[in-house]
Image: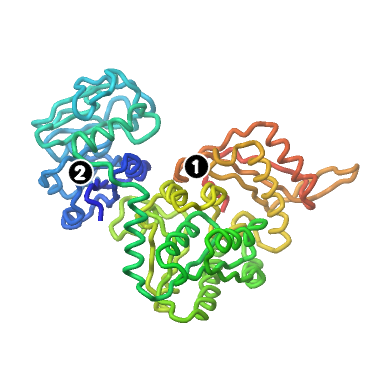
């Protein structure tokens, strides 16, 4: 589909997806394959260049992840980053050993060769290091092209084969000239052209949807979030009234969520939408359930049942449109790098089999930030495009302990106040997420000279680029004060508010 393509091989770095995003930000299409991808898959992808990501391993370990060495015989440019650099040195005849001094954080890079990969880069620049090993000897035909005080070999190059390797991470924001280094690799080394844009994506995706669907009907589950809304609008743009959207109120939504979704799709885009209030049904299933994984499974399974019941009422339905994003695709690849499952995610496989539906996933090539750009191209209101992520299980995993309508109502009111004050302060779009959590504890308080024993609300606000890592937001004290005062005074049943100051990792963004 896209002729200008870069392949990223994933060796387990927390920054792998960031590498692919940086490439796409330069308007070149990229995909991530696991490090052990078969050579025939790599060849069929026809990349103009390959990047070897970083990773937590050491190349001299017995079980160190290594690629198929035939990638070095493909005759295309390859760039190694951190562990990727050590792979290149190790596999091509150099040597790698444990460093006497580990190098983590910012470091000053001294550029010894300002051509090619370092074209336009100052002789001294700040980069981000994260390694405990170092190159002891470079392979033949390679030459060092940069160093730091701790790393005599911080970058190497075999210019004849267009192989380059960097000990630092150009993809992270802390590397000041990182975007320029990546662009040099894309445009100077790989000779790519910047053709990857959302306009070109819309044109290509719309035609694919038309060709696949023909005159058949499509259903799409709508949550009110960015992904499902953009999916619905893109599919509707392609096939019009052959699409019917189904919105299920599961009883664990935020204040005004259902009304807002219906108004957006029906009024702004004149789309067919069926709204189903199944809140009592979901809450009955969730009663007495404490375990967050069980909550997720109950909500996912019940959604499938409700959705199936409504979809069967529509004649001629053969396709299900879903807002799967590229990170979801990466996580479900049959060949995986070293990673762990933190939480289970919603899966519609059972729905597809029972209803014999075919799947349409028009966003499966996109990252979250690209979906927002796509939404703007499709003229979706900013209120939806810039909406902070909201979990599929909704308030059920923000009501710690068992879920009831009363507890959801308390949390709904508190959460609405958090969002109102965050927006008033002009902080909403600066934060990745900001929300309230109802804790399973009660505390003693005093209201009007009377002793109270009521609920505690935790406020969570984080800053992040992609949700993979996050830091707690340093909200102004006056904003926190207003949030606390309003919740305690306006939400019956709450007499204490606390603020969560933990980062991800080691914590997660959501409490459950």
The quarter of the displayed image where residue 287 is located: bottom right
Count of picture labels: 2
Picture residue at 45% right of the left edge, 67% below the top: 240
For residue 504, which numbered disc appears in the image? 1
Tell me: residue 255, above or below residue 316. above
For the residues marked 2 and 1, what is the alpha-carbon distance in whole angstroms?
32 Å
Looking at the picture, tell me which residue is in the foreground, 62 or 166: 166
Picture residue at 70% right of the left edge, 46% below the top: 417
Picture residue at 72% right of the left edge, 52% below the top: 413
Looking at the picture, tell me which residue is in the foreground, 223 or 286: 223
For residue 49, which numbered disc appears in the image? 2
The C terminus: image quadrant: bottom right
Tell me: residue 154, above or below residue 44. above
Picture residue at 51% right of the left edge, 53% below the top: 380
Color theme of the render: rainbow
Residue 168 point in image, percent of width and height: 30, 31
Q: In this view, does 383 lie to the left or right of 220?
A: right
Residue 282 point in image, percent of width and height: 62, 69
Q: Is residue 36 left or right of residue 294?
A: left
The quarter of the displayed image where residue 425 is located: top right
Residue 251 point in image, percent of width and height: 64, 65
Of tags 2 and 1, the one toward the viewer is: 2
Residue 81 point in image, percent of width and height: 27, 36
How many other residues sit within 10 Å of disc 2, few (<14), some (14-19) or many (≥20)? many
Q: Is residue 233 left or right of residue 31?
A: right
Looking at the picture, tell me which residue is in the foreground, 512 or 331: 331
């Amino acid at each position: 589909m896209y002729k200008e393509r870069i392949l990223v091989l994933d060796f387990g770095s927390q920054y792998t997806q960031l590498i692919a995003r940086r490439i796409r930000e330069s308007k070149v299409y990229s995909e991530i394959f696991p490090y052990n991808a078969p050579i025939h898959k790599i060849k069929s992808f026809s990349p103009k260049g390959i990047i070897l990501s970083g990773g937590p391993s050491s190349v001299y370990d017995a079980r160190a992840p290594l690629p198929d060495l035939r990638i070095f015989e493909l005759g295309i440019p390859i760039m190694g980053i951190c562990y990727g650099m050590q792979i290149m040195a190790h596999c091509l005849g150099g040597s790698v050993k444990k460093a006497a001094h580990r190098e983590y954080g910012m470091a000053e890079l001294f550029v010894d060769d300002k051509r090619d990969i370092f074209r336009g880069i100052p002789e001294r620049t700040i980069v981000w290091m994260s390694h405990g090993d170092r190159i002891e000897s470079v392979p033949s035909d390679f030459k060092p092209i940069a160093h730091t005080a701790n790393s005599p070999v911080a970058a190497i190059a075999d210019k004849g084969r267009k192989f380059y390797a960097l000990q630092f991470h150009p993809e992270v924001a802390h590397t000041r000239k990182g975007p320029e280094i990546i662009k040099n690799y894309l445009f100077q080394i790989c000779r790519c052209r910047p053709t990857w844009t959302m306009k070109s994506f819309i044109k290509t995706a719309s035609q694919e949807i038309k060709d696949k669907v023909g005159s058949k009907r499509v259903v799409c589950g709508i949550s009110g979030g960015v992904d499902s809304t953009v999916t619905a609008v893109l599919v509707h743009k392609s096939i019009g009234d052959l699409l019917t959207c189904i919105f299920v109120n599961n009883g664990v939504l935020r204040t005004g969520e259902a009304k807002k979704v219906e108004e957006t799709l029906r009024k702004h885009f004149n789309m067919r939408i069926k709204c189903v209030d199944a809140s009592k049904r979901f809450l009955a299933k969730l009663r007495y359930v404490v375990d967050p994984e069980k909550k997720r499974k109950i909500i996912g399974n019940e959604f499938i049942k409700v959705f199936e019941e409504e979809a069967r009422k529509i004649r001629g339905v053969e396709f299900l449109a879903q807002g799967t994003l590229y990170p979801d695709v990466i996580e479900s690849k049959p060949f995986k790098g070293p990673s762990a499952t933190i939480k289970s995610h919603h899966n519609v496989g059972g729905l597809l089999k029972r209803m014999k539906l075919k799947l349409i996933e028009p966003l499966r090539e996109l990252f979250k930030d690209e979906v927002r750009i796509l939404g703007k191209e499709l003229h979706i209101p900013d209120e939806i495009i810039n909406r902070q992520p909201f979990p599929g299980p909704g308030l059920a995993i923000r009501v710690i302990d068992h879920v009831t309508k009363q507890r959801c109502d308390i949390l709904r009111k508190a959460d609405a106040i958090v969002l109102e004050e965050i927006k008033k302060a002009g902080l909403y779009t600066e934060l990745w997420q900001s929300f309230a959590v109802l804790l399973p504890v009660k505390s003693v308080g005093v209201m009007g000279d009377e002793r109270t024993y009521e609920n505690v609300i935790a406020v969570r606000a984080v800053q992040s680029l992609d949700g993979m890592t996050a830091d707690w937001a340093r909200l102004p004290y006056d904003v926190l004060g207003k949030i606390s005062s309003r919740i305690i005074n306006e939400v019956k049943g709450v007499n204490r508010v606390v603020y969560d100051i933990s980062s991800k990792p080691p914590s997660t963004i959501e409490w459950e």
